[in-house]
Image: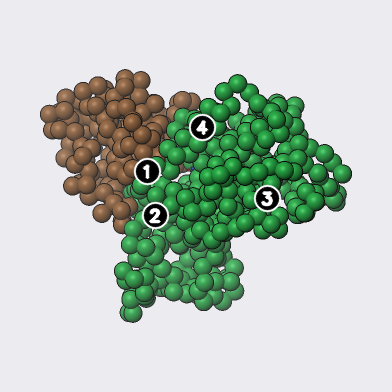
Amino acid sequence: MLANSGYAEIEELSRVIPSKERLAKGAVAIAECLQSIPCNPCNSACKRGAFLAFKDINDLPTVDVERCNGCGLCVSACPGLAIFVVDESFNETEALIKLPYEFLPLPIEGKDVPALDRKGEIVGTARVVKVQNTKTMDRTPVIWIAVPKAMSMIVRNIRP
Amino acid sequence: MEKTEILIIGGGPAGLEAAIHAAGLGAEVTLIERDPFLGGQLTKQTHMFFGSYEQFAGVRGVDIAEKLKKEIEENPKIKVLLNAAVAGIYPDGVVTVSQKNKFLKFKPNRIIVATGAYEKMLPFPNNDLPGICGAGGVQTLMNLYGVLPGQEIVMVGAGNIGLIVSYQLLQAGAKIKAILEASPNIGGYLVHAAKIRRMGVPILTSHSVKEAYGKDFVEGVVVHQLDEKWAPVPGTEERMSCDVLCLAVGLSPLSEILWQAGCEMKWIPELGGHVAVRDEDLLTTVSGLYIAGDVAGVEEASAAMVEGKLAGMAAAESLGYSVEGLLEKKDSARSELAELRAGHSGDKIRGGIDRVERLTRGKVTC
Ligand SMILES: Cc1cc2nc3c(=O)[nH]c(=O)nc-3n(C[C@H](O)[C@H](O)[C@H](O)COP(=O)(O)OP(=O)(O)OC[C@H]3O[C@@H](n4cnc5c(N)ncnc54)[C@H](O)[C@@H]3O)c2cc1C
Ligand code: SF4
Ligand code: SF4
């Protein structure tokens, strides 16, 4: 369980995982932020208003999956590094995951790297598609990786 | 004897905001900081902060410190003394300061104490071995001075500080063997816990340190499991080697100056220890003496900044300074605080504050 081990079981994430149909349509943000804390930069970062308005700063974030186009702006803005973008329409066999990554050295585009799950255990291989590290990202680079479709809800980290 | 209208002790986020807002009303401010730089704890916080836009959420602590420092430097009403430690506050209202080889005396009209907090220690056999240190100390070594104190680290405490310092140790290239947490649940934000866990660091809840071992320095710890009543479970002892044992077991308000000044103090464990009784303007029971930030109750930089703002405005107001909409500004600071403390994570803080806040305006006479 997230509260005593630090990793969320897939059942705990059901509130934030979009429907199969929505996932199949293309990129969408998943905010794996399951505890009420005083925080809201995700909401201010999204230019499309896809994070539902916070009544109170302690509200849980909710993504309006119809408005979200998976641009990934919120990924580097989240101080909890809790937002991922998943695109199951990436190609026939692979899903694309955009994840925040604050370690050096940064991975190299085109290379294969170990893919890690929420426990940090190696569960397969990911191909680094893109490394985004712009000034607006303010030192929280976003890494785009391609993984087999079946791993789209399992892989959440890499080790370069 | 030096004169100043408002003397602020401590240049962390609380003291910086207090200075900016007191000077904003027109008061002459002197800010005293014992370190060679301003910013307090913020100077070593390389991670992005929580909170909302007003409290710079999403911005890294170090960058918040830079923004505030710039505002202070540009304000002619604020005088800053660095490398200057306040030694005492005397009954006649005199504040003594030692700055390098100089000994200064101030006679301010108002005082705001924003001295922050200090790290708690944990009792266990051999806890005096070199290599056993506070997490805040490790963070200072690493992020301010570029020194990585070890390669294989065991962290004690899964509160926000234990989690964040573990993350920063990973970023610096160290290995975290485990994070031990005595309570059955992780105390810090679960988003922080998740980002460390997905780096492969085990977070062992219901576990603690039995003892440390090592000849000349720490070579490892004996870890044991705890039951629901926090009693050790016999037979669960396990040796874990490490070259640094990092303790992140809480902070306590740095309140010696308040004791010495004669403030009425109360023991409020939810706020980290002894804190001064205060009113809604953060005025203590000693006339003209205000508090703000972790010294008023260990919370977060976001709350410390808002408290600093409030105490700064209130102290300047009590000297007769004002601006348009001052009442609303103070009220909005109070509601910002209420909002920060509103959630589940604020339950403890709210309970603590309720027991130490006296909602009657204290009389200002100095
Ligand atoms: C590892 C870690 C991570 C954190 N992460 C976050 C976060 O993500 N978000 C958040 O909101 N908060 C965070 N915090 C908490 C935050 O840093 C503190 O709550 C905040 O700095 C308190 O501000 P302050 O001004 O009261 O005290 P401090 O920042 O401690 O400043 C006090 C200042 O007073 C000076 N001083 C003390 N005594 C004297 C004296 N006698 N004379 C002169 N000067 C004196 C000190 O040198 C210091 O500069 C974190 C803290 C730590 C340790
Ligand atoms: S991915 Fe883009 S559109 Fe979707 S929530 Fe994040 S910022 Fe908004
Ligand atoms: S910014 Fe991140 S940590 Fe903060 S509320 Fe949004 S998703 Fe949660």
Q: Describe residue B141's horizontal placement relative to residue B237 as left or right.
A: right
Q: Nearer the viewer, residue B81 or A16?
A: B81
Q: Is residue A51 above or below residue B46?
A: above
Instruction: Measure the alpha-carbon separation of dots 1 and 2.
Output: 14 Å
Asked whether residue B130 appears in the rendered view, the answer is yes
Q: Amino acid at mark 4?
A: Asp
Instruction: Measure the alpha-carbon separation of dots 1 and 4.
Output: 20 Å
Colour chosen for chain A: brown
Image location of residue B8, percent across then percent down? 70, 42
Q: Chain of mark 4?
A: B
Please tell me which residue is depicted at 44% across the width and 59% down the height of the picture.
B157
The residue beneath circle 1 is B343
Q: Amino acid at mark 2?
A: Gly
Of callouts 1 and 4, the N-terminal one: 4
The residue beneath circle 3 is B286
Q: Nearer the viewer, residue B242 or B236?
A: B236
Q: Amino acid at mark 3?
A: Val
Q: Amino acid at mark 1?
A: Gly
Please tell me which residue is depicted at 59% across the width and 35% down the height of the picture.
B309
Q: Residues within 10 Å of mark 4 (few under 14, many from 20)?
A: some
Q: Residue furthest left?
A: A21
Q: Chain of mark 3?
A: B
Instruction: Measure the alpha-carbon separation of dots 4 and 2.
Output: 31 Å
Of callouts 4 and 2, the N-terminal one: 2
Q: Are marks 1 and 3 on the same chain?
A: yes
The residue beneath circle 2 is B187
Instruction: Please name which of the two marks, 1 or 4, marks the residue nearer to the observer.
Output: 4
Q: Quadrant of residue A149 in the image? A: top left
Q: Are marks 4 and 2 on the same chain?
A: yes
Of callouts 1 and 2, the N-terminal one: 2
